[in-house]
Image (spheres, rainbow, N blue to C red):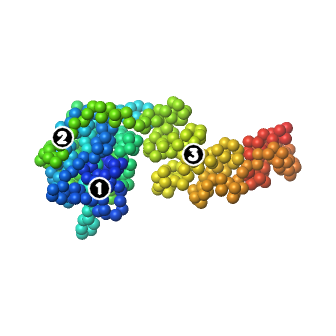
Amino acid sequence: MGKYYVTIGIEMHCEGSKTNSKMFSPSKNTYNDLSNDNVCEIDMGFPGVLPAPNKKGVEQAIKMATVLHSNIPKYMYWERKNYYYPDLPKGYQLTQNPPYDCIGNGGYIDIEREDGSTFRVEIDNLHLEEDSAQMEHLYNTSIINYNRCGVPLFELVTKPCLHNADDTILYLEYIRSIYQYLGISEADSKKGQIRCDVNVSISDDENTLGTKVETKNVNSFSAVRDVINYEIERQSILKDQGRYNEVEQETRRWDEETGTTVRMRSKVDAIDYKYFVEPNIPKIKIEESWVEEIKKTLPELPYERKNKYINDLGLSDYDSRILIKEKKTSDYFEECLKLGIEPKTAANWIITMVLGYIYKEFIEIDEIFLTPERLYKITEAIKKGTISSKQGKELFNLVLERNEEPEKIMKDEGMEQISDDGAIKSIIEEVLSENPSQIEAYKNGRTNMFDYFVGQVMKKTRGQANPSLVKEILTELLK
């Protein structure tokens, strides 16, 4: 089954969650637990209403097109994509019709693998449209939530240029992070803000495209990986068995319970949606000066931050990749740097402690009680020798457990280290006087007794003695 050449194309839909209103109406663009609350006459397609494009949504699309090295047209207009479905109250979707009037045409983006190599993903188009409503299918009925209807939706379509699941997921993860860094979307799959259509084909050689099979509305990157691997296997088995005619151009869906794709309908080369230009929105000229102004506002992107972390801050490639993967994590790290935490110290605490906690608690890093300011107080106490590294980890856990300030907990728990030379020397002398046989053993070559003495000192001081000072004074006394 590894003898076939695999070709993959991805259509990634991302909801724009960072505009105040929807794409063509003044309805709020907010994630709302109350169904059908963010809705107005324009969203529902009432007679006589007039849509108006959201300028910020267009600006965001231009930013994304710039990052993708896409061609931005001189004029922009919307078309009606006509089809009937309950989640589309108007009976059509306001969209852009590839390849004629998309906000981004062509382009590419280079993706880095973990081994340091790169691969290029060619872009077919980026177009801006409105999202449909959200449907939930129950046992004997379906319900519709129109809050999502009309929300800005960015659809990014690649050319058939990917060839395995690993590269596809790397591409999707990086595009997701770009949406976050550009301030276009939270790109949160738990809120349904990311959906993918996955096109997979196999052929006998790289010069021939096989029959494309599309799997619609895949809601997570792990599911995208599963879909690709399943389709490669399914199509390969059919070809191995000589059943070439059973690999047909069709639309399928992913069934998570069975781990299989399921046929929905056959698909011809071009579906006739009867596109026509939206008559209520005039053609908009995209001034070059406006595009240049937008380009100047582009922020530092993930790979740029990664290179800065490696080259300027001395972090490892592994640590840098983890820090940039989510913008919120990278922002947390950046805030730690501004407060004065050493880069490697901040990276270690975030990667080993902070991320471990938020993954366990299923929360976002900006929801954690231990803010960069509180982490600074912990690391500064360790740096000054007020508490030990071990106590620092204990303090970290207590801050999160009690939702109290680090200083208060240090005071309540009596955590401050003993760093007085005289006091530590007195305790060490007491320990040595109580352990003459261990001293003899140490003199006879059992150097592991040194750690025993350190342990006894820490026990007597309830872990509050400064460890480095204990070792220094103990070494002198044992001489």
Residue under label 1, please give it. 27
Vertical relation: 109 (above or below) 278:
above
For the residues bearing labels 3 and 1, Cβ distance under 8 angstroms: no
Q: Position of residue 175 (x, y in %)?
A: 36, 41
Is residue 455 among the parts visible in the rendering? no
Q: Earlier in the sequence, mark 2 or mark 3?
A: 2
* x 66%, y 46%: residue: 381
Of residue 361 and residue 275, the one placed in the foreground of this image is 275
Q: Is residue 468 visible?
A: yes
Residue nearest the viewer, comparing 49 with 411: 49
Task: Please identify the quarter of the rendering in which residue 65 is found.
Answer: top left
- What is the CA distance from the residue labelled 3 to the residue labelled 1? 42 Å
Q: Residue 393: x, y in percent? A: 62, 50
Q: Amino acid at mark 1?
A: Ser
**Of marks 3 and 1, the one in the foreground:** 1
In terms of secondary structure, where does tag 3 sit? helix
Q: Residue at x 51, y 49 (%)?
A: 355
Sort mark 1 into few (<14), some (14-19) or many (20+) by Cα contacts within 10 Å: many
**Dot 2 lies on which element?**
loop
Residue on which the image places disc 3:
349
Q: Secondary structure at mark 1?
A: loop
Q: CA distance from mark 1 to mark 2?
A: 23 Å
Question: The residue under label 2 is which amino acid type?
Answer: Lys
| Whole-number angstrom distance, CA of label 2 to CA of label 3 | 52 Å
Mark 1 or mark 2: whose residue is earlier in sequence: 1
In the rendered view, would you say 71 is above or below 198?
A: above
Q: Write the residue at 44% across / 45% down.
A: 326
Residue 272 % position (x, y): 12, 47
Q: Pointer 2: what residue?
A: 283
Q: Mark 2 or mark 3: which is in front?
A: 2
Query: What is the quadrant of residue 264 in the picture?
Result: bottom left
Residue 6 bears which disc, if any?
Answer: none
